[in-house]
Amino acid sequence: MSEQALQAAVQEDARAREAALDPARSFIVQAPAGSGKTGLLTQRFLVLLARVETPEEVVAITFTRKAAGEMRGRILEALAAAGGEAPADDHERRTWTLAREVLARDTALGWQLVATPDRLRILTIDALNAALIRQMPVLSRFGAPPSIAEDASELYREAARETLRELDSEAHWRGAVERLLLHLDNHWGRVETLLAEMRKDDETEHLEVVENSPATIAGRAGVLLHIRFRNDKGLEIQRRVYAFVDSGGIYTLSYQAPTLHYFDRDFEVFEHTVRSFRTGA
């Protein structure tokens, strides 16, 4: 890249960053790691703080406590630095100017943000949901203040028990659970354990069940599950699973591949493997 082209790119980046500070507009910021996204979000948070009546009106939501702590730290550092000399760096000077506007607003309305930083609403999604529920004790129907469970194993097991208790209902999943009970000789304890140990794959989204039907594997009655989903890279994946139970335990045969090119290429090989499968019993 020539010096002229590089200079033009830097200027375009500066214009985009400045535009993202417009409080009357919404933006999606997409950039690689280390490009200054957190710094830009910190500046926008300061812009919004300088325009509200109370600091609680501005809410920033993050996925992790670490990210929330980092952003809170950046804002408090900016407010602390605003009492000193203006930095030489353009980006830092812009943050310094915005922080001074927030301090002026703080003084005018008596927020005392430096003394009470907990008024900054920078939260994880879980923390925000918990705060909302605490404000609506009747509507939420919680008997006690909710908390985030680090180990949700017992909650999964409780959900599994509730699922089994509703087998007499007309729920759409009733048939699938009945088939599972049949394969496990009506062993409710094992079914409860299997259901409790199910987890949603955090790397998948837009899950679609292509096929869920009875199947015969190695001469034994079983089930076939075929699903389609997108992973965290946006790639469509297909997974086909055959399963059955006999005295030797639970057998599963699965095949997974990206839909594009690969799934159809090896599909027949997998189906042939299933038809040829023997347990050795």
Image (spheres, helix red, strand yellow):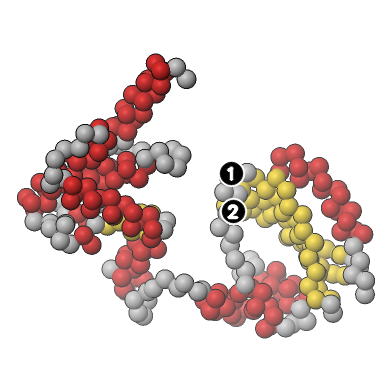
**Residue 110 vertical position relative to residue 35 in the rendered view, above or below:** below
| Cβ atoms under marks 2 and 1 closer than 8 Å | no
Q: Residues within 10 Å of mark 1 (few under 14, many from 20)?
A: few
Residue 191 placement: quadrant? bottom right
Label 2 SS: loop
Is residue 88 shown above or below 161?
Answer: above
Is residue 39 placed above or below 209 in the rendered structure?
above
Task: Residue at 21%, 34% (x, y): give it.
Answer: 88
The residue positioned 76% from the left and 45% from the top of the image is: 263
Q: Is residue 154 above or below residue 60?
A: below
Q: Which mark is residue 18?
A: none
Tally of numbered discs = 2
| Left or right relative to 281: residue 181 | left
Residue plotted at (14% across, 40% down): 85
230 left or right of 7? right
Tell which residue pokes out farthest to the left in this image: 108
Percent of width and height locating residue 26: 33, 39
Answer whether residue 136 is visible to the viewer in this image. Answer: no
Q: Is residue 257 visible?
A: yes
Q: Which residue has dot 1 on it?
A: 234
- Measuring 44% from the left and 38% from the top, which residue is drawn there? 31
Q: Amino acid at mark 2?
A: Thr
First in sequence: mark 2 vs mark 1? 2
Residue indicated by mark 2: 204
Work out how far the residue at label 2 is from the one at label 1, CA to CA, in angstroms: 9 Å
Q: Amino acid at mark 1?
A: Gly
